[in-house]
Amino acid sequence: MAKMKEKKEQEVEQSEETTEDTVIEETEEQDTEAVEAATEEGEKDKKDLQIEELNDRLIRNMAEFDNFRKRSEKEKSQMFEIGAKNIIEKILPVIDNFERGLGTVTEEEKESSFVQGIEQIYKQFITALEEAGVTAIEAVGQEFNPDFHNAVMHGEDDNYGENIISDEFQKGYMYKDTVVRHSMVKVVN
C-alpha cells in the first residue's frame, strides 16, 4: 500500500508539475502575444504619430505659404501706392505752373484759341488726376488742420473767425487717403 500511496503522490506531483508547466507555458505565450501586440501597436502608434507630424507640418507649410502670398500682395500694393505717390509729387509742380499761367491771362486774351486750348488741356489733366484718386485739399474758409494744412503766415482778418484759413498760397493734394502735399496757407489769429 505504501507503494501505491507513493505512486499516487508521484502521479499527483507529476500532474501538478504538468499543470504548472502548462500554466507557465500559457502565461509565457500570452506574454509573448501581448508583447507582439504591443510591438505592433507601438509600430502603429509610431506610424500614426509620424502621419500626424507630417500632416501638422503640411498644414503649417500651407499656412506659411498663404501668409507669404498675402504679405507679397500687400507689399506689391504698397509699392504701387508709393510709386503712384512719387509720380503725383512730380506732376504737381506742372499743375501749379498751369494755374499760374492761366491766372495771368487777361480778359481780352481769354477769347483766343490758344488760351482756350491751354484751359482745356488743364481741365483734362485735372480730370485724369481725379480719376486716378488725386483730389485737391479744401483750404480757404476751412478751419486750420495740421494734418492737411501748413501755416506759413498768421494774420488778422475781420471776415474770418479765429483759426480759419484766409488765404491759400499753394494748393495741397491727397492721393486716395494720404496727403501728397500740404496746403500752404495763411491762418487768422
Image (cartoon, rainbow, N blue to C red):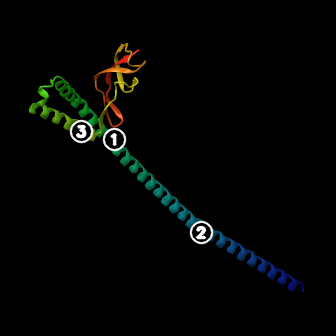
- 25 above or below 160? below
Residue type highlighted by circle 1: Glu
Residue type highlighted by circle 2: Ala
Q: Which residue was labeled with disc 2?
A: 37
On the rendered structure, is 125 left or right of 5?
left
Query: Mark 2 packing: few (<14 Cα in 10 Å), some, or many (20+)?
Result: few
On the rendered structure, is 117 left or right of 136?
left
Gap in angstroms between the C-alphas marked 1 and 2: 56 Å
Mark 3 or mark 2: whose residue is earlier in sequence: 2
Disc number placed over residue 56 in the picture, else none:
none
On the rendered structure, is 112 left or right of 41?
left
Gap in angstroms between the C-alphas marked 3 and 1: 29 Å
- Which quarter of the image is occupied by the C terminus? top left
Q: Which of marks 1 and 2 is in front?
A: 1
Q: Which residue was labeled with disc 3?
A: 127
Name the secondary structure under disc 3.
helix
Name the secondary structure under disc 1.
helix
Q: Which residue was labeled with disc 1?
A: 75
